[in-house]
């Protein structure tokens, strides 16, 4: 039995300890906003926050999240960031969007007023086949709104 907080709720997970956190989130907890892209930690589609740090859930055995605080896209409290992604067209096809938004939230927590270079660097672990310009514009707009 693994105990952890998922989206601000204590959960007890009965799963083999080496099960991927990604599979537990999607299959057992039905939090399907977390996507599987590559399954190798290269694309960022499965990104979640673990104790506030961005992590690829496809690489994390569930046993490593004992007593951790996990935030998925469903539990992220960042309405201005999410609104900026919608309004600026950063959501595009949607496959990378949950991971991009979580990566952007982690970025904005560290750098409230990031430069375009910081955005490019911090989001480099998230792949998008549609293009990055609207995503970068979404993050810049979210930072601008937060600075008001």
Image (tube, helix red, strand yellow):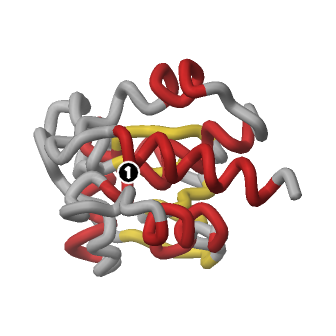
Classify residue 39 as left or right of residue 82. Answer: left
User: Residue at position x 53%, y 67% from top?
Assistant: 82
Q: Is residue 143 visible?
A: yes
Q: Residue at x 34, y 58 (%)?
A: 97
- Residue displayed at 46% across by 25% down: 120
Query: Which residue bears the numbered disc 1?
Result: 99
Q: Is residue 16 above or below residue 124?
A: below
How crowded pointer 1 is (Cα within 10 Å; few <14, some 14-19, many 20+) is rated as many
Please give the name of the residue rendered at 29% of the width and 80% of the height, measured from the top-left corner. 30
In front of the other: 111 or 44: 111
Residue toward you, 17 or 143: 143
- Left or right placement of residue 71 versus residue 14 in this view: right
- Location of residue 44 by image quarter: top left
Quarter occupied by the N terminus: bottom left
Q: Quadrant of residue 70?
A: bottom right
The C terminus, quarter of image = bottom right
Report whether 49 appears left or right of 46.
right
Q: Is residue 144 left or right of residue 100?
A: right
Q: Report x, y in % for residue 58.
A: 25, 44
User: Residue 19 at what x, y percent from top left?
Assistant: 23, 51
Q: Nearer the viewer, residue 116 or 75?
A: 116
- Which percent across, then down, holds residue 137? 50, 46
């Amino acid at each position: 039995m693994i105990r952890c907080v998922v989206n601000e709720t204590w959960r007890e997970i009965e799963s083999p300890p080496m099960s991927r956190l990604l599979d537990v989130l999607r299959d057992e907890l039905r939090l399907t906003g977390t996507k599987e892209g590559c399954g190798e930690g290269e694309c960022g589609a499965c990104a979640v926050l673990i104790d506030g740090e961005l992590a690829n859930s496809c690489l994390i055995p569930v046993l490593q999240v004992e007593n951790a605080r996990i935030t998925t896209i469903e539990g992220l409290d960042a309405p201005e960031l999410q609104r900026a992604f919608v309004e600026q067209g950063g959501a595009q096809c949607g496959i990378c969007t949950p991971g991009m938004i979580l990566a952007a939230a982690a970025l904005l927590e560290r750098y409230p007023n990031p430069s375009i270079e910081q955005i490019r660097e911090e989001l480099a672990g998230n792949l998008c086949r549609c293009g990055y310009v609207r995503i970068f514009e979404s993050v810049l707009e979210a930072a601008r709104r937060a600075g008001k």
